[in-house]
Amino acid sequence: MNNKTTRRTFLIGSIAAATAVGTKTLTQQSKTPPSIISIPQSMPERVLGKTNLSLPIFGLGGAGRTPLSKHGQEKEAIAIVERALALGVRYYDTAANYGPSEEYLGKILPPYRREIFLNSKTKVRDRDGAWRELERSLKRLNTDYLDSWQLHSVSSDEDLEQIFKKNGAIKAFEEAKEQKIVKYIGITGHHEPDIIVKGLERYPFDTTLVSINAADIHHPRPFSSIVLPVAQGKKVGVIAMKVPAYGRLFKPGILEGMEQAMGYTLSLSGVHSCIIAAENPEQLESNIRVAQAFQPFNETQMKSIEQLTANAGEDGRFFRRWT
């Protein structure tokens, strides 16, 4: 029995056992009966690049200012995810290093697995290490496959060299996709758009997750004008993160609210969806209402918002230093 077969068999057996335990926990804790697995279609949808999948324009982020990434807040995290499911959120984003995020999602998402798009990430750059993180992510999430697996926070030429060397992480990604453990593979970046472009030109990624918001255009190296044209040309699915810059774009004299922040980002040509974390169910509901009412901004509206964010200064750029 070769290494690939052994790994695949291991995954199926271990995840099946974990799922049985996870479902029992869900039955005890969730207010939503496991038998109810229909998720309403409540938001506009777009096709995620060459994946040909139609997904809502808004997804739930699993990091940042959210109970999903904080230990000791399982009850609060589950309340947010339950509300997200009830309101039609089908895109769920997490990562191996987002604290307990994967574990929390693994307690609530299994009964809905076929109706959602589940994405996780790894910052490990070698093949064997990436495989180990994938196995752990699958166990935590109580699933035997990911819809998308992404290389996390690729920020330098050194990152790319490590990923693409003989025993680099890209080998694990290719093997996992070949074995149907992951459907799509992607690359993400917080800091350097030129590095993401190099990655997209070097490998036929399915998706990319990058920092794009209404202040990005004023940065010396904007993701919007550097990455989006390349991604469009290669039909790569683009998901935007850091849309409100952790709320700093809502300070007095900048943007009025999420309507402007989300509206601007989703109106950029080439952006297919965005992920935003939520501090509580009420904030999540507010963000979803914005997504439900979204209409693309015209050029005049876009320029007006860019004029407002020109006043953001370091508040508009600080998120590029954060991961």
Image (cartoon, rainbow, N blue to C red):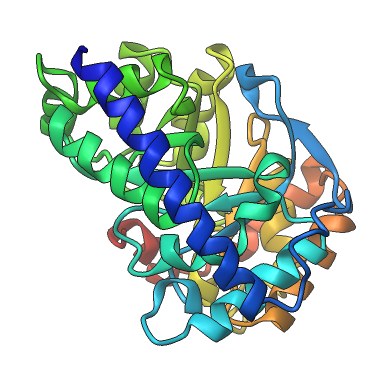
Against 242, residue 104 (above or below) is below
Please provide percent x and percent y for residue 1: 21, 12
127 relative to 300 in the view: left or right: left
The residue positioned 68% from the left and 54% from the top of the image is: 111
Please provide percent x and percent y for residue 164: 18, 19
Location of the C terminus by quadrant is bottom left
Against 203, residue 41 (above or below) is below
Q: Splitting the image into 4 quarters, where does residue 94 fall?
A: bottom left
Q: Splitting the image into 4 quarters, where does residue 107 fall?
A: bottom right
Residue 66 seen in the current view: no
Q: Splitting the image into 4 quarters, where does residue 229 fall?
A: top right
Please provide percent x and percent y for residue 295: 88, 48
Against 267, residue 230 (above or below) is above
The residue positioned 39% from the left and 57% from the top of the image is: 140
87 relative to 59 in the view: left or right: right
The residue positioned 73% from the left and 43% from the top of the image is: 115
> How many numbered badges does the structure rendering display?
0
The front one of 169 and 209 is 169
128 relative to 323 in the view: left or right: left
Residue 43 seen in the current view: yes
The front one of 200 and 143 is 143
Please provide percent x and percent y for residue 300: 80, 46
The residue positioned 78% from the left and 41% from the top of the image is: 299
The front one of 253 and 103 is 103
